Image (cartoon, rainbow, N blue to C red):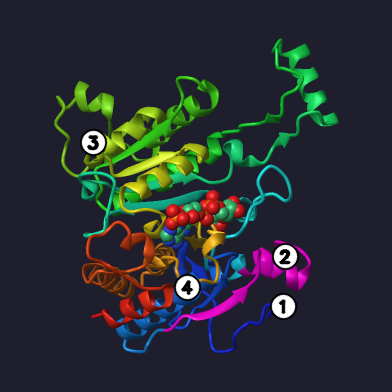
Protein backbone atom coordinates (compact mmCIF):
# COMPACT_ATOMS: atom_id res chain seq x y z
CA UNK A 1 0.00 0.00 0.00
CA UNK A 2 1.35 3.44 -0.97
CA UNK A 3 2.70 5.51 1.90
CA UNK A 4 1.20 8.98 1.98
CA UNK A 5 2.41 11.97 3.95
CA UNK A 6 -0.97 13.21 5.19
CA UNK A 7 -3.59 10.98 3.58
CA UNK A 8 -4.80 8.24 5.91
CA UNK A 9 -6.06 5.20 4.00
CA UNK A 10 -9.08 3.73 5.84
CA UNK A 11 -8.64 0.08 6.80
CA UNK A 12 -12.30 -0.86 6.40
CA UNK A 13 -12.61 -0.07 2.69
CA UNK A 14 -11.49 -1.52 -0.65
CA UNK A 15 -10.16 0.06 -3.80
CA UNK A 16 -12.25 0.41 -6.96
CA UNK A 17 -10.36 -1.32 -9.76
CA UNK A 18 -10.66 -1.58 -13.53
CA UNK A 19 -11.32 -5.01 -14.98
CA UNK A 20 -12.04 -5.78 -18.64
CA UNK A 21 -12.42 -2.06 -19.35
CA UNK A 22 -15.10 -1.74 -16.65
CA UNK A 23 -15.12 -0.39 -13.10
CA UNK A 24 -15.13 -3.13 -10.50
CA UNK A 25 -16.90 -1.70 -7.46
CA UNK A 26 -16.63 -3.46 -4.09
CA UNK A 27 -19.43 -3.10 -1.51
CA UNK A 28 -17.21 -0.83 0.60
CA UNK A 29 -15.33 1.35 -1.93
CA UNK A 30 -12.82 3.91 -0.69
CA UNK A 31 -13.77 7.27 -2.21
CA UNK A 32 -11.28 10.15 -1.93
CA UNK A 33 -12.86 13.49 -0.96
CA UNK A 34 -11.50 17.00 -1.41
CA UNK A 35 -13.56 19.10 0.97
CA UNK A 36 -12.86 22.36 -0.87
CA UNK A 37 -12.49 26.01 0.11
CA UNK A 38 -15.12 28.58 1.13
CA UNK A 39 -18.49 26.84 1.40
CA UNK A 40 -16.79 23.47 0.78
CA UNK A 41 -17.05 22.32 4.37
CA UNK A 42 -20.77 23.23 4.65
CA UNK A 43 -21.83 21.43 1.49
CA UNK A 44 -19.50 18.44 1.80
CA UNK A 45 -20.68 17.61 5.31
CA UNK A 46 -24.31 17.80 4.15
CA UNK A 47 -23.61 15.73 1.04
CA UNK A 48 -21.77 12.96 2.83
CA UNK A 49 -24.63 12.61 5.30
CA UNK A 50 -27.24 12.43 2.55
CA UNK A 51 -25.23 9.91 0.49
CA UNK A 52 -24.47 7.69 3.49
CA UNK A 53 -28.14 7.64 4.50
CA UNK A 54 -29.34 6.83 0.97
CA UNK A 55 -26.79 4.06 0.39
CA UNK A 56 -27.63 2.50 3.75
CA UNK A 57 -31.36 2.62 3.06
CA UNK A 58 -31.20 1.55 -0.59
CA UNK A 59 -28.93 -1.44 0.03
CA UNK A 60 -30.08 -2.30 3.57
CA UNK A 61 -26.60 -1.78 5.02
CA UNK A 62 -24.93 -4.18 2.53
CA UNK A 63 -23.08 -1.37 0.76
CA UNK A 64 -21.23 1.57 2.28
CA UNK A 65 -18.94 4.30 1.00
CA UNK A 66 -15.69 4.61 2.94
CA UNK A 67 -14.65 8.26 2.53
CA UNK A 68 -10.96 9.14 2.47
CA UNK A 69 -9.93 12.79 2.93
CA UNK A 70 -7.40 14.05 0.39
CA UNK A 71 -6.23 17.63 0.20
CA UNK A 72 -6.14 20.53 -2.26
CA UNK A 73 -6.51 24.29 -1.96
CA UNK A 74 -6.28 26.06 1.40
CA UNK A 75 -6.26 22.87 3.47
CA UNK A 76 -3.38 21.50 1.40
CA UNK A 77 -1.47 24.74 1.68
CA UNK A 78 -1.72 24.53 5.47
CA UNK A 79 -0.66 20.90 5.60
CA UNK A 80 1.90 20.63 2.79
CA UNK A 81 2.71 24.28 1.99
CA UNK A 82 1.54 23.61 -1.55
CA UNK A 83 -1.88 23.99 -3.15
CA UNK A 84 -2.09 20.73 -5.07
CA UNK A 85 0.13 18.02 -3.57
CA UNK A 86 1.21 15.20 -5.86
CA UNK A 87 -0.17 12.60 -3.44
CA UNK A 88 -3.69 13.99 -3.91
CA UNK A 89 -3.44 13.46 -7.67
CA UNK A 90 -1.88 10.00 -7.12
CA UNK A 91 -4.64 8.98 -4.70
CA UNK A 92 -7.47 10.02 -7.03
CA UNK A 93 -5.80 8.16 -9.91
CA UNK A 94 -5.40 5.08 -7.75
CA UNK A 95 -8.90 5.07 -6.22
CA UNK A 96 -10.55 6.02 -9.57
CA UNK A 97 -13.75 7.73 -8.31
CA UNK A 98 -13.64 10.88 -6.16
CA UNK A 99 -15.83 13.70 -4.86
CA UNK A 100 -14.63 17.30 -4.76
CA UNK A 101 -15.74 20.61 -3.23
CA UNK A 102 -14.97 23.97 -4.92
CA UNK A 103 -11.47 25.46 -4.87
CA UNK A 104 -10.47 29.12 -4.97
CA UNK A 105 -8.72 30.49 -8.05
CA UNK A 106 -7.13 33.93 -7.93
CA UNK A 107 -8.11 36.24 -10.82
CA UNK A 108 -5.52 37.97 -13.00
CA UNK A 109 -2.46 36.50 -11.25
CA UNK A 110 -1.29 34.11 -8.52
CA UNK A 111 -1.35 30.36 -9.12
CA UNK A 112 -3.14 28.57 -11.95
CA UNK A 113 -6.62 27.15 -11.37
CA UNK A 114 -6.34 24.00 -9.27
CA UNK A 115 -9.57 22.78 -10.85
CA UNK A 116 -8.10 23.10 -14.34
CA UNK A 117 -4.83 21.48 -13.18
CA UNK A 118 -6.68 18.50 -11.68
CA UNK A 119 -8.59 17.98 -14.92
CA UNK A 120 -5.47 18.28 -17.08
CA UNK A 121 -3.17 16.19 -14.87
CA UNK A 122 -5.59 13.24 -14.95
CA UNK A 123 -6.81 13.80 -18.51
CA UNK A 124 -10.39 14.19 -17.28
CA UNK A 125 -11.35 15.34 -20.71
CA UNK A 126 -15.13 15.45 -20.40
CA UNK A 127 -16.85 17.86 -18.05
CA UNK A 128 -20.38 16.51 -17.85
CA UNK A 129 -23.10 18.84 -16.62
CA UNK A 130 -26.72 17.70 -16.68
CA UNK A 131 -29.28 20.48 -16.33
CA UNK A 132 -32.89 19.66 -15.59
CA UNK A 133 -35.70 21.18 -13.61
CA UNK A 134 -37.00 20.26 -10.18
CA UNK A 135 -40.74 20.97 -9.90
CA UNK A 136 -41.59 24.01 -7.81
CA UNK A 137 -38.22 25.77 -7.99
CA UNK A 138 -38.50 29.44 -9.01
CA UNK A 139 -37.12 30.23 -12.45
CA UNK A 140 -36.73 33.34 -14.61
CA UNK A 141 -38.32 31.55 -17.60
CA UNK A 142 -41.94 30.52 -18.25
CA UNK A 143 -41.30 26.83 -18.98
CA UNK A 144 -38.16 25.76 -17.11
CA UNK A 145 -39.28 22.11 -17.30
CA UNK A 146 -38.67 22.13 -21.06
CA UNK A 147 -34.92 22.30 -20.54
CA UNK A 148 -33.42 18.86 -19.94
CA UNK A 149 -29.92 18.74 -21.37
CA UNK A 150 -26.56 17.18 -20.60
CA UNK A 151 -23.63 19.41 -21.48
CA UNK A 152 -20.38 17.64 -22.44
CA UNK A 153 -17.74 20.34 -22.17
CA UNK A 154 -14.18 19.65 -23.38
CA UNK A 155 -12.07 19.97 -20.27
CA UNK A 156 -8.38 20.05 -21.13
CA UNK A 157 -7.67 22.53 -23.93
CA UNK A 158 -9.02 25.67 -25.67
CA UNK A 159 -8.14 28.97 -23.94
CA UNK A 160 -8.10 27.02 -20.66
CA UNK A 161 -4.84 25.33 -21.65
CA UNK A 162 -3.06 27.96 -19.55
CA UNK A 163 -0.76 29.11 -22.36
CA UNK A 164 -0.66 32.86 -21.90
CA UNK A 165 1.83 35.69 -21.57
CA UNK A 166 1.42 38.89 -19.59
CA UNK A 167 1.38 42.27 -21.29
CA UNK A 168 4.81 43.88 -21.26
CA UNK A 169 6.69 40.69 -20.30
CA UNK A 170 9.84 39.58 -22.10
CA UNK A 171 8.03 36.50 -23.37
CA UNK A 172 5.00 38.33 -24.73
CA UNK A 173 7.33 40.69 -26.62
CA UNK A 174 9.05 37.66 -28.19
CA UNK A 175 5.71 36.13 -29.20
CA UNK A 176 4.31 39.36 -30.62
CA UNK A 177 7.50 40.21 -32.50
CA UNK A 178 7.68 36.73 -33.97
CA UNK A 179 4.03 36.76 -35.05
CA UNK A 180 4.14 40.25 -36.49
CA UNK A 181 7.34 39.52 -38.35
CA UNK A 182 6.80 35.94 -39.55
CA UNK A 183 3.04 35.67 -39.75
CA UNK A 184 2.37 39.20 -40.97
CA UNK A 185 0.00 39.89 -38.09
CA UNK A 186 -0.41 43.37 -36.62
CA UNK A 187 -0.85 42.66 -32.93
CA UNK A 188 -0.62 45.73 -30.71
CA UNK A 189 2.57 45.67 -28.65
CA UNK A 190 0.63 46.47 -25.47
CA UNK A 191 -1.33 43.18 -25.69
CA UNK A 192 -1.44 40.16 -23.44
CA UNK A 193 -1.51 36.92 -25.45
CA UNK A 194 -3.35 33.66 -24.88
CA UNK A 195 -3.26 30.55 -27.08
CA UNK A 196 -6.32 28.52 -28.02
CA UNK A 197 -5.35 24.97 -28.98
CA UNK A 198 -8.14 22.63 -30.06
CA UNK A 199 -6.97 19.21 -31.19
CA UNK A 200 -8.42 16.26 -33.09
CA UNK A 201 -7.61 14.10 -30.04
CA UNK A 202 -9.33 16.38 -27.50
CA UNK A 203 -12.37 16.89 -29.71
CA UNK A 204 -12.87 13.26 -30.65
CA UNK A 205 -12.53 11.84 -27.14
CA UNK A 206 -15.13 14.36 -25.95
CA UNK A 207 -17.61 13.90 -28.80
CA UNK A 208 -17.25 10.11 -28.54
CA UNK A 209 -18.35 10.26 -24.88
CA UNK A 210 -21.24 12.60 -25.69
CA UNK A 211 -22.62 10.36 -28.46
CA UNK A 212 -22.16 7.23 -26.38
CA UNK A 213 -24.09 8.90 -23.55
CA UNK A 214 -26.95 9.72 -25.94
CA UNK A 215 -27.04 6.12 -27.20
CA UNK A 216 -26.83 4.56 -23.72
CA UNK A 217 -29.61 6.77 -22.41
CA UNK A 218 -31.80 6.66 -25.56
CA UNK A 219 -31.59 10.42 -26.06
CA UNK A 220 -32.62 11.97 -29.38
CA UNK A 221 -29.81 14.33 -30.34
CA UNK A 222 -26.25 15.52 -29.85
CA UNK A 223 -25.53 19.13 -30.83
CA UNK A 224 -21.99 20.34 -31.51
CA UNK A 225 -21.82 23.91 -30.19
CA UNK A 226 -19.05 26.02 -31.72
CA UNK A 227 -18.07 29.47 -32.93
CA UNK A 228 -16.66 28.08 -36.16
CA UNK A 229 -17.87 30.95 -38.33
CA UNK A 230 -15.19 33.13 -36.70
CA UNK A 231 -12.58 30.72 -35.28
CA UNK A 232 -12.44 28.40 -38.27
CA UNK A 233 -9.42 26.25 -37.47
CA UNK A 234 -10.26 25.70 -33.80
CA UNK A 235 -14.02 25.86 -33.22
CA UNK A 236 -14.89 25.19 -36.86
CA UNK A 237 -12.57 22.21 -36.79
CA UNK A 238 -14.26 21.02 -33.57
CA UNK A 239 -17.50 20.84 -35.54
CA UNK A 240 -15.93 19.08 -38.54
CA UNK A 241 -14.04 16.53 -36.43
CA UNK A 242 -17.20 15.92 -34.39
CA UNK A 243 -19.20 15.00 -37.51
CA UNK A 244 -16.27 12.97 -38.83
CA UNK A 245 -16.15 10.89 -35.65
CA UNK A 246 -19.93 10.46 -35.54
CA UNK A 247 -19.97 9.09 -39.11
CA UNK A 248 -16.90 6.89 -38.68
CA UNK A 249 -17.54 5.34 -35.27
CA UNK A 250 -21.34 5.46 -34.90
CA UNK A 251 -22.46 5.24 -38.55
CA UNK A 252 -25.37 2.87 -37.98
CA UNK A 253 -26.62 4.66 -34.90
CA UNK A 254 -26.64 8.29 -36.03
CA UNK A 255 -28.14 10.56 -38.65
CA UNK A 256 -26.74 14.01 -39.35
CA UNK A 257 -29.07 16.98 -39.75
CA UNK A 258 -28.16 17.20 -43.46
CA UNK A 259 -29.02 13.53 -43.94
CA UNK A 260 -32.28 13.98 -42.06
CA UNK A 261 -33.47 16.21 -44.91
CA UNK A 262 -31.60 14.68 -47.87
CA UNK A 263 -32.42 11.04 -47.02
CA UNK A 264 -35.34 10.98 -44.59
CA UNK A 265 -37.47 13.99 -45.65
CA UNK A 266 -37.17 15.52 -42.19
CA UNK A 267 -38.63 12.49 -40.40
CA UNK A 268 -36.22 11.13 -37.85
CA UNK A 269 -35.74 7.33 -38.18
CA UNK A 270 -36.56 5.47 -34.96
CA UNK A 271 -33.81 4.60 -32.49
CA UNK A 272 -31.13 6.84 -34.05
CA UNK A 273 -29.37 9.85 -32.61
CA UNK A 274 -29.55 13.10 -34.57
CA UNK A 275 -26.17 14.86 -34.84
CA UNK A 276 -26.51 18.59 -35.44
CA UNK A 277 -24.49 21.72 -34.82
CA UNK A 278 -25.24 25.25 -33.71
CA UNK A 279 -23.15 28.39 -33.54
CA UNK A 280 -22.57 29.25 -29.87
CA UNK A 281 -24.39 32.60 -29.83
CA UNK A 282 -27.42 31.04 -31.48
CA UNK A 283 -27.27 28.19 -28.96
CA UNK A 284 -27.78 30.66 -26.11
CA UNK A 285 -31.03 31.72 -27.80
CA UNK A 286 -32.06 28.17 -28.56
CA UNK A 287 -31.87 27.01 -24.93
CA UNK A 288 -34.25 29.84 -24.07
CA UNK A 289 -36.59 29.69 -27.06
CA UNK A 290 -36.60 25.99 -28.08
CA UNK A 291 -35.11 24.12 -25.12
CA UNK A 292 -37.01 20.88 -25.80
CA UNK A 293 -35.20 20.40 -29.13
CA UNK A 294 -31.89 19.62 -27.39
CA UNK A 295 -30.68 16.61 -25.39
CA UNK A 296 -26.89 16.48 -25.36
CA UNK A 297 -24.66 19.47 -26.12
CA UNK A 298 -20.99 18.85 -26.94
CA UNK A 299 -18.87 21.98 -26.66
CA UNK A 300 -15.30 23.25 -26.52
CA UNK A 301 -14.14 24.35 -23.08
CA UNK A 302 -15.08 28.03 -22.93
CA UNK A 303 -18.49 27.75 -24.63
CA UNK A 304 -19.38 24.94 -22.25
CA UNK A 305 -18.43 26.97 -19.21
CA UNK A 306 -20.68 29.89 -20.16
CA UNK A 307 -23.49 27.71 -21.40
CA UNK A 308 -23.69 25.52 -18.31
CA UNK A 309 -24.06 28.50 -15.94
CA UNK A 310 -26.68 30.05 -18.22
CA UNK A 311 -28.64 26.78 -18.39
CA UNK A 312 -28.35 26.35 -14.62
CA UNK A 313 -29.89 29.81 -14.14
CA UNK A 314 -32.90 28.74 -16.23
CA UNK A 315 -33.73 25.91 -13.84
CA UNK A 316 -33.19 27.77 -10.58
CA UNK A 317 -29.54 28.72 -10.24
CA UNK A 318 -26.19 27.37 -9.23
CA UNK A 319 -27.61 25.67 -6.16
CA UNK A 320 -29.00 22.95 -8.45
CA UNK A 321 -26.14 22.45 -10.93
CA UNK A 322 -24.19 19.20 -10.65
CA UNK A 323 -21.12 18.15 -12.62
CA UNK A 324 -18.49 15.53 -13.23
CA UNK A 325 -15.02 15.46 -14.78
CA UNK A 326 -14.53 12.16 -16.52
CA UNK A 327 -11.66 10.56 -18.37
CA UNK A 328 -11.42 7.03 -19.72
CA UNK A 329 -12.14 5.62 -16.23
CA UNK A 330 -11.42 8.22 -13.54
CA UNK A 331 -14.42 10.26 -12.41
CA UNK A 332 -14.06 13.39 -10.27
CA UNK A 333 -17.48 14.67 -9.28
CA UNK A 334 -18.05 18.30 -8.32
CA UNK A 335 -20.68 21.06 -8.36
CA UNK A 336 -20.68 23.64 -11.15
CA UNK A 337 -20.44 26.57 -8.71
CA UNK A 338 -17.41 27.96 -6.91
CA UNK A 339 -16.47 28.67 -3.30
CA UNK A 340 -19.08 31.45 -2.78
CA UNK A 341 -16.81 32.93 -0.07
CA UNK A 342 -19.40 35.31 1.40
CA UNK A 343 -21.44 32.31 2.60
CA UNK A 344 -18.52 30.23 3.93
CA UNK A 345 -19.17 28.67 7.33
CA UNK A 346 -22.61 30.31 7.64
CA UNK A 347 -24.65 27.12 7.26
CA UNK A 348 -26.71 28.89 4.59
CA UNK A 349 -25.71 27.74 1.13
CA UNK A 350 -27.62 25.19 -0.95
CA UNK A 351 -25.80 21.82 -0.95
CA UNK A 352 -28.05 20.63 -3.82
CA UNK A 353 -25.42 20.90 -6.56
CA UNK A 354 -22.90 18.79 -4.69
CA UNK A 355 -25.59 16.33 -3.60
CA UNK A 356 -26.67 15.96 -7.24
CA UNK A 357 -23.01 15.59 -8.27
CA UNK A 358 -22.77 12.76 -5.74
CA UNK A 359 -25.86 11.23 -7.40
CA UNK A 360 -23.96 11.30 -10.71
CA UNK A 361 -21.12 9.56 -8.88
CA UNK A 362 -23.52 6.88 -7.63
CA UNK A 363 -24.88 6.45 -11.17
CA UNK A 364 -21.30 6.10 -12.43
CA UNK A 365 -20.74 3.36 -9.84
CA UNK A 366 -24.03 1.74 -10.92
CA UNK A 367 -25.44 2.37 -7.43
CA UNK A 368 -28.34 4.10 -9.11
CA UNK A 369 -30.91 2.85 -6.58
CA UNK A 370 -29.37 5.21 -4.02
CA UNK A 371 -29.12 8.02 -6.59
CA UNK A 372 -32.80 7.70 -7.53
CA UNK A 373 -33.73 7.73 -3.85
CA UNK A 374 -31.83 10.99 -3.27
CA UNK A 375 -33.26 12.73 -6.33
CA UNK A 376 -36.83 11.76 -5.35
CA UNK A 377 -36.27 12.90 -1.81
CA UNK A 378 -34.79 16.20 -2.99
CA UNK A 379 -37.93 16.75 -5.07
CA UNK A 380 -40.10 15.91 -2.07
CA UNK A 381 -38.17 18.37 0.12
CA UNK A 382 -38.72 21.10 -2.48
CA UNK A 383 -42.41 20.15 -2.71
CA UNK A 384 -42.65 20.71 1.05
CA UNK A 385 -41.15 24.18 0.53
CA UNK A 386 -38.48 23.96 3.19
CA UNK A 387 -35.46 25.09 1.24
CA UNK A 388 -32.20 27.07 1.43
CA UNK A 389 -32.17 30.87 0.95
CA UNK A 390 -31.50 30.78 -2.80
CA UNK A 391 -34.57 28.70 -3.54
CA UNK A 392 -36.70 30.37 -0.85
CA UNK A 393 -36.26 33.80 -2.45
CA UNK A 394 -37.67 32.45 -5.72
CA UNK A 395 -40.56 30.40 -4.28
CA UNK A 396 -43.85 31.71 -2.93
CA UNK A 397 -44.69 30.64 0.65
CA UNK A 398 -41.42 28.75 1.21
CA UNK A 399 -39.64 28.43 4.54
CA UNK A 400 -35.90 29.10 4.67
CA UNK A 401 -33.66 26.52 6.32
CA UNK A 402 -29.88 26.25 6.64
CA UNK A 403 -27.55 23.84 4.81
CA UNK A 404 -27.48 21.20 7.53
CA UNK A 405 -31.23 21.30 8.21
CA UNK A 406 -31.91 21.01 4.47
CA UNK A 407 -29.73 17.88 4.35
CA UNK A 408 -31.53 16.48 7.41
CA UNK A 409 -34.88 17.11 5.71
CA UNK A 410 -33.71 15.33 2.56
CA UNK A 411 -32.70 12.34 4.70
CA UNK A 412 -36.07 12.36 6.53
CA UNK A 413 -37.95 12.43 3.22
CA UNK A 414 -36.16 9.39 1.79
CA UNK A 415 -38.36 6.43 0.91
P1 LIG B 1 -19.45 31.17 -7.09
O1 LIG B 1 -18.60 30.74 -5.98
O2 LIG B 1 -20.05 30.11 -7.93
O3 LIG B 1 -20.60 32.09 -6.50
C1 LIG B 1 -21.31 33.07 -7.23
C2 LIG B 1 -22.73 33.19 -6.74
O4 LIG B 1 -23.47 32.06 -7.19
C3 LIG B 1 -22.92 33.18 -5.22
O5 LIG B 1 -22.69 34.45 -4.65
C4 LIG B 1 -24.36 32.75 -5.14
O6 LIG B 1 -25.22 33.80 -5.57
C5 LIG B 1 -24.44 31.69 -6.23
N1 LIG B 1 -24.11 30.36 -5.72
C6 LIG B 1 -22.93 29.69 -5.80
N2 LIG B 1 -23.02 28.51 -5.21
C7 LIG B 1 -24.27 28.39 -4.75
C8 LIG B 1 -24.96 27.38 -4.03
N3 LIG B 1 -24.38 26.23 -3.67
N4 LIG B 1 -26.24 27.62 -3.69
C9 LIG B 1 -26.82 28.77 -4.04
N5 LIG B 1 -26.23 29.76 -4.70
C10 LIG B 1 -24.96 29.56 -5.07
O7 LIG B 1 -18.64 32.11 -8.11
P2 LIG B 1 -17.52 33.20 -7.84
O8 LIG B 1 -17.91 34.04 -6.66
O9 LIG B 1 -17.34 33.82 -9.15
O10 LIG B 1 -16.22 32.37 -7.51
C11 LIG B 1 -15.67 32.21 -6.20
C12 LIG B 1 -14.40 31.37 -6.30
O11 LIG B 1 -14.73 30.03 -6.71
C13 LIG B 1 -13.38 31.89 -7.32
O12 LIG B 1 -12.09 31.75 -6.75
C14 LIG B 1 -13.54 30.95 -8.49
O13 LIG B 1 -12.37 30.83 -9.25
C15 LIG B 1 -13.86 29.65 -7.78
N6 LIG B 1 -14.57 28.67 -8.63
C16 LIG B 1 -14.26 27.36 -8.43
C17 LIG B 1 -14.93 26.38 -9.14
C18 LIG B 1 -14.55 24.95 -8.87
O14 LIG B 1 -13.95 24.65 -7.86
N7 LIG B 1 -14.89 24.04 -9.76
C19 LIG B 1 -15.92 26.72 -10.05
C20 LIG B 1 -16.26 28.08 -10.22
C21 LIG B 1 -15.57 29.04 -9.49
P3 LIG B 1 -26.11 34.72 -4.60
O15 LIG B 1 -25.17 35.48 -3.72
O16 LIG B 1 -26.86 35.59 -5.56
O17 LIG B 1 -27.01 33.84 -3.84
Magenta segment: does it hold 71? yes
Q: Is mark 3 within 8 Å of ligand 1?
A: no
In primary-sequence order, the first of circles 3 and 2 is 2
Instruction: Read off the residue under disc 4.
Output: 347
Which quarter of the figure is the C terminus placed in?
Answer: bottom left
Residue sitting farthest toward the right? 170
Labelled pair 2, 4 in contact (Cβ < 8 Å) = no
Magenta segment: does it hold 116? no
Q: Nearer the viewer, mark 1 or mark 3?
A: 3
Q: Identify which residue is drawn at 56% across, 73% down.
A: 32
Task: Report crowding for label 4: few under 14, some 14 to 19, many 20 or more residues within 10 A (C-alpha).
Answer: many
Secondary structure of the residue carrying tag 4 is: loop
> What percent of the width, then of the height, locates residue 145?
22, 50
Labelled pair 3, 2 in contact (Cβ < 8 Å) = no
Q: Nearer the viewer, residue 326 or 130?
A: 130
Q: CA distance from mark 3 to mark 2?
A: 45 Å
Q: Is residue 25 visible?
A: no
In primary-sequence order, the first of circles 2 and 4 is 2
Q: Identify which residue is drawn at 60% across, 41% down.
A: 160
Compared to residue 202, the image places residue 31 above or below, namely below
Instruction: Read off the residue under disc 1.
Output: 6
Q: Quadrant of residue 339?
A: bottom right
Q: CA distance from mark 4 to mark 1?
A: 28 Å
Instruction: Read off the residue under disc 2.
Output: 85
In primary-sequence order, the first of circles 4 and 3 is 3
Labelled pair 1, 2 in contact (Cβ < 8 Å) = yes
Q: Nearer the viewer, mark 3 or mark 2?
A: 3
In the displayed structure image, the side of residue 87 where residue 289 appears, left or right? left
Amino acid sequence: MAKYKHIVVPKDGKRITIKNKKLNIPNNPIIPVIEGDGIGRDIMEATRRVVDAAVKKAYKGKKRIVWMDVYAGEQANELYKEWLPQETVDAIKKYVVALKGPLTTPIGGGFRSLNVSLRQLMNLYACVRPVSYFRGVGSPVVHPEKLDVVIFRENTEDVYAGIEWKKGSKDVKKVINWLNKNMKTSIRTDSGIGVKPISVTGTKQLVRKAIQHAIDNKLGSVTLVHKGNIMKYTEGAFRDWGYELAKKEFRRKIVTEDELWSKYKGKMPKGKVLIKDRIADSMFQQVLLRPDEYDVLATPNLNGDYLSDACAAQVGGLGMAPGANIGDYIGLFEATHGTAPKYAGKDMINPGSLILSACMMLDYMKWDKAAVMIRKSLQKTIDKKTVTYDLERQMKGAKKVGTSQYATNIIKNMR
